[in-house]
Each structure stands twice: as structure tokens, then as C-alpha cells.
Image (cartoon, coloured by chain):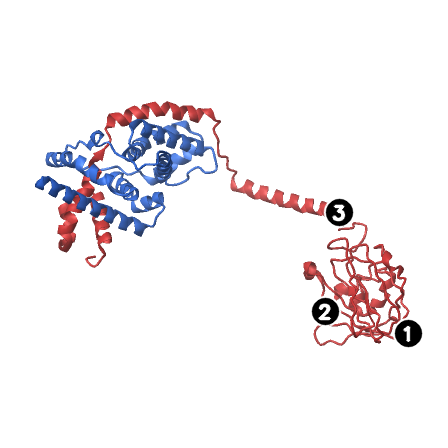
Chain colours: A blue, B red
Amino acid sequence: MILLVLPDIPEEDALLTAARQGQEAAVMQIYESYFPPIYEYIRLRVNDRHEAEDLASEVFLKFVKALRGPNAPRHSLRGWLFKVARNVIATHHVKLKQQPEIELEEWFAAPSDQDPEIIFLHNLNSQTIHEAMRRLTADQQEVLVLRFGQQLSLEETADIMGKSIGAIKTMQFRAVESMRRLLNAGRKEESYG
Amino acid sequence: MADWPMPEIFNDCVERLHDGQPIEDVLRQYPNYADTLRPMLEITRGIQQLRVPSAEIAESQDRIRSEVLREYHATPSRRIYTLPPILNIAAALMLTCLCIIGSGAGLVATGIIDLDNDDVQFGTPSAQPSITDSPTATFSPMVSGTPTATTTASLTRTSTSSPTASPSRSSTPTATTSSTRTLTVTSTRTASRTPSITSSHTSTPHATLTRTTTPTNTSLIPTRLPAGSTPLPPQNPPPTLDDNSGSNNDNGSENDNDDDSDEGDDNDNTNSNDNGGGEDSDDD
């Protein structure tokens, strides 16, 4: 099992305040801390690696610019960054006018030294999981990535997606249930085939 | 908890997984739903395992870092300066004083406040007297003791009957008089407590002096008489109305019949000079 270290909110706010006051070290610390999850989130929703890189770059350039303007984030930096990333991805998809596709071969299960059996199980199923995810709606994919991939809280996910907490609960349940049906159907096809 | 709807139960399980509980422990909380929940929780755990290769992330991060730094240095850093609270208060007081002084200067500059005159004039400098024909009143001089209007009405009064002024509670004296002529009133200035006289041609033997107040400065209109108080008798003969009403001239100088309203001495107003405007109105 992977445990994500969630950010310490007061520390995050202090860092953000320092960044807004023009401390370069704080800005770069934010970049170093938040680039991986933001990039990963984008990468999961965008087909091409270079496009994902461009979009991640756009997110952090917007952040640096926003620090100098009135719309600078004051709280919940992580949520702010994910929200910007979400908008950037949406704009990208509008430009492409297509649903995001995922190149499954570029994904693999994260290495874990805790349980070899789990490593084996998830290595085996990662492609299948991705195939099932690709069949979900964009919102369902997003809620799964944010809630389970990035382990954001309900509140953060609701804020980023612009929905209520109740809607997120329902959406994540339906998304996983849909994946379950798809996986079962795939399993049956395999066994029959 | 068992009565919760499935989305709630599932979310609770997810939260427990986030907290680090093993799936078996989580499922023990909901034994009735374990069969449904187990594959769903396995799927969520599978999604959690999906990661982008760390080498890819590191490469991208290195490439973009220089862009971010370039952007950061491209524009001057904006520092947030905050004043200590005491300076904030002082600054607020200073601004308030400046606003007051500025507005006062503006009032003087625009002539709304005449520093040479004791009377404070409020409102717009041009007040038009309204001439209304009332079917019952022959002559209804309308004394607009409005603080907003400073209208000078010079009128020639030729009334034959002795007036009985009955100021109403709203400081509106009612004068009964018989007038035979038409009064033309012209106002060139803003009249505060200056009468605007309304006359009609009918020959009903009473004219009503009405004090009209404009709504903008209502707070400044003194209440002249309490309810139920008896009106004061007029001390002066009623105004005689003249056609020619050189009246129109009211060059402001003459106005100030301010007192009118109040104490029934309205009649003097014609000749303007505030008959102790001070006394009248305000004291009531």
C-alpha cells in the first residue's frame, strides 16, 4: 500500500505567504513539492507526455504570475494548483476536441516493498484498470484520479471539480461501480475467449 | 452506519483506507456489505497504485524549473507591505479629515455655503417656485421654507382683508386673505426658508401659505408646532399680490424670509431681510 504524505496545511499557508511576499526560495519549494502530483494528475488525463509537460509548465507559470496579482492563492494552495491544472486540461481537451486517452503501456504499478503479493497483483491488473478507466466519463475519471490517485479529501475534490461533497460521494461510488462492472465483463470475456 | 446509503458507506471505507486501515479491518465494519465492498475497495487500491514513472517526472520537473525561474525573475517581485494598526487608524483619520475639508471647500467654492452670511443654504442653487391654481384659494402663497431652496420672491402685496395665518403642524402657516391679483414669483437663487409663492386667480378669500419641504433635506426642517397647538395669529398684514411681481427678481438678497413659516410673521418676508431668521425657526 502506498501512503501519500498529505501537506501540512499551516506549513503550506506559511509557505504561500512567504511566496507572496517575494521569497524565491518559497516559490521554488512550492514548485518542488507540488510538481510531481500536478504532473501526475495531468499525465493521467492527457495522452501525450510532452503535452502533459507543457500543461504542467503552464500551471506553474500561472502560479508565479498569480503571485504578483490580486488573484494570488491565499489558502489551500494544493487545491488552487489542482484547479488550475483541471482548467488547463479542460482547455487542452477543448482544443483537441477529443476525450483524453491514456497510453496504457506508459503506466505501471508503483513499486512497493511492503507486500510482494500486492505488487504482483497490481502489476498484473494495472493495464486492465486503465482500460476500464478509459471507458468512464471524464468526470468519473477525474474523481477517481483526485480521490484515489492523489488522495485528495472530499472537500478538496468538490472544490476543484466545482461540485458538492454529496455529489462527489455519489460520483466516486458510481465510478468505481462502473469500473467493477467493466472489469467483470472483461474477465468473463477472457474466460469465454 | 449500516443504514447509510451505499455511497456513504463506500466513502467511509475509502476514508478508512486513506487512514491506513487494511481492507479486512474496513470490511469488518460492514459485514453485510462486505461482498459488494471488497471488489470496489480493491479497485480503489489499484487506482492508488498507478503512478507515472518517477524518472519521467524528474525529467519534466528539471526542464520546467528553469522556465518557472525565468518567469519569476521576469517581473519585479511584489512585496506586500502592511502598516501597523496604529498607522492604519491614523491614515484613516487623515483621509476622513481630508474628505471633510475637501467637501467643505467644495461647498464654499460652489456657493452653497456662504461664509459671509449667517444663513446656511442647502440644496441646489436654483429653485423654481411652483405656481399652483387651487380651486379654493385665491391666492396661495407657498412659502417654501425648505432648507434646500433659497428663493427670493419679491412680491407686492395688495390684500384687502386681514389675514388669519394658521400655521399647520408642519410649520405651514395658512393665511387667509383676499387677493385680487395674480402673483408672479420668480426665483433665481436657491431658497432656503424663502417663500415660493403660489397664487391663483380665483377670488376665494383666503390664501394658504404652505411650506413645502423638499425631501432631500427633510432632516433639517424644524418642527414648528407641536400637534394640536393653536396657530399663532399673524402679526403683520398679509402680503399683497402684484402682477408685475418684480418679484421675479429675487436676487437672493431679498430672500431670507425664512422666519415666515414659523411664527406667523411670514408676511414680512417679502422684504426679505431675515427678520431675525435666527429666532424663528430654529428655536422651535
Residue A186, image x and y in percent? 15, 41
Q: Which amino acid does label 2 sit on?
A: Ser
Query: Can residue B21 be seen?
Result: no
Q: Mark 2 lies on which chain?
A: B
Q: Earlier in the sequence, mark 3 or mark 2?
A: 3
Q: Distance between the residues labelled 1 and 2?
A: 27 Å
Q: How far apart are marks 3 and 1 (CA)?
A: 42 Å
Q: Do the residues labelled 3 and 2 touch (CB within 8 Å)?
A: no
- Examine the image and state in which quarter residue B168 appears: bottom right
- Examine the image and state in which quarter residue A15 appears: top left
Q: Is residue B274 above or below residue B139?
A: above
In the displayed orientation, state which residue is furthest to the front.
A193
Residue A145, image x and y in percent? 27, 39
Secondary structure of the residue carrying numbered label 2: loop
Q: Name the residue under label 1.
A: B160
Q: In this view, does A104 lie above or below B270?
A: above
Q: Name the residue under label 2.
A: B170
Q: Name the residue under label 3.
A: B110
Of residue B83 and residue B201, the one placed in the foreground of this image is B201
- Examine the image and state in which quarter residue A93 appears: top left
Q: Is residue B136 above or below residue A79?
A: below
Q: What residue type is labelled 3?
A: Thr
Question: Residue B54 has which mark?
Answer: none
Secondary structure of the residue carrying numbered label 1: loop
Judged by depth in the image, the label closer to the viewer, 3 or 1, is 1
Q: Mark 3 lies on which chain?
A: B
